[in-house]
Image: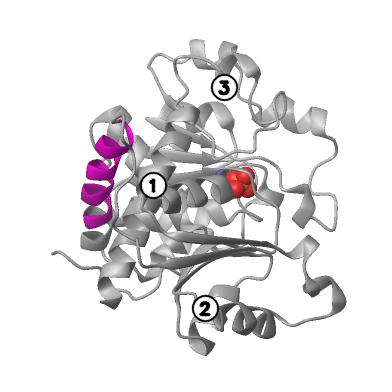
Amino acid sequence: MTQLSVKHLLGIKDLKEEDIQLIFETADNFKTIINRPIKKVPSLRDITVANLFFENSTRTRISFELAQKRLSADVINFSSSSSSVSKGETLIDTVRNILSMKVDMVVMRHPSPGACVFLAKHIDATILNAGDGTHEHPTQALLDAYSIKEATGGVTGKKVAIIGDILHSRVALSNIYCLQKLGAEVMVCGPSTLIPRHIEQLGVKVEHDLRKALEWCDVANMLRIQFERQDIKYFPSLREYSMQYGLTLDILNSIDKDITIMHPGPINRGVEITSEVADSDYSIILDQVENGVAIRMACMFLLAKHKE
Ligand code: CP
């Protein structure tokens, strides 16, 4: 397989296992390239990409922009807070205006689930979802699975626990789809108020006890509490949450095996994970960030090739 089966990257749900493997093989090549003294290749030289961020981002926005620059694309950055969206312009009008300036590819983060699917139906450019509300964050899941492969030798047969606020997390859903397509077993762990009802229908195990989840897994992906998406209180206090679900070095050291610790960021140190764990040898958090650039280069390169 040399081409992706999809024209847009809207979610992991739409990808086949072979698509993910192709993205990983392509990312391997780009990872070699970006570690050389000359890090730039001309692969997207004639492509213009617009990064449309309707929601805050640090890692994803910078990682996409760096990936585009490494591929020699022309880049336009848009953030809704400093745009005419605040004057009442609709999403479709905003994007159509940007596209009339001959943009080929759109990377979009938006607070509404399905915003990228909507856009793909109405405009001609290639769309990459950089996170749509509580729905999907496909490049995060791809870089997470790629980092698990790199750290542990493979994803197939691995036991991965996703721990924290599953209810409001797009990272959790995309990770579940991606890891299962690659043959991993997935568990979600957190208080019952932060676990979506019927999630076991996706084929995941559900656990409410952090220690039991850690004893089961090879890899623990710690998620933050997404206060910005919560309209009611889901647990009595942050202190109580961190006492029950906060990952400490004491808990890790008391378990009779090494577990790979991940976090998509942003980290709330002292809540879902202590600094001691985040900065320990168990943690591959900064490897995830590094791998994000190669994964995003691979996605954009392969989607541009699909359009040729
Ligand atoms: N992991 C992630 O999506 O981080 P940002 O919100 O900073 O992009």
User: Could you say whether the residue bearing mark 3 is in a helix, strand or loop?
Assistant: helix
As drawn, the label of residue 278 is 3
| Residue 125 percent location from the top left of the image | 45, 79
Q: Nearer the viewer, mark 1 or mark 3?
A: 1
Quadrant of the rendering where the C terminus is positioned: bottom left
Q: Residue at x 36, y 67 (%)?
A: 46
Which amino acid type is marked by label 2?
A: Val
Of 122 and 143, the residue lying toward us: 122
User: Could you say whether the residue bearing mark 2 is in a helix, strand or loop?
Assistant: helix
Which amino acid type is marked by label 1?
A: Arg
Position of 95 with respect to 242 (left or right) is left
Q: Nearer the viewer, mark 2 or mark 3?
A: 2
- Disc 2 + disc 3, Cβ < 8 Å: no
Q: Residue at x 25, y 36 (%)?
A: 32
Q: Which residue is mark 1?
A: 70
As drawn, the label of residue 117 is 2
User: Could you say whether the residue bearing mark 1 is in a helix, strand or loop?
Assistant: helix
| Among numbered discs 2 and 3, the one appearing first in the sequence | 2
- Tell me if I can see residue 121 in this picture: yes
| Residue 124 percent location from the top left of the image | 45, 85
**Magenta-tinted stretch:** 22-35
- Magenta span includes 149: no
User: Disc 2 and disc 3: Cα gap in Å?
Assistant: 35 Å
User: Disc 1 and disc 3: Cα gap in Å?
Assistant: 29 Å
| Residue 177 percent location from the top left of the image | 40, 58
Q: Nearer the viewer, mark 2 or mark 1?
A: 1
| Among numbered discs 1 and 3, the one appearing first in the sequence | 1
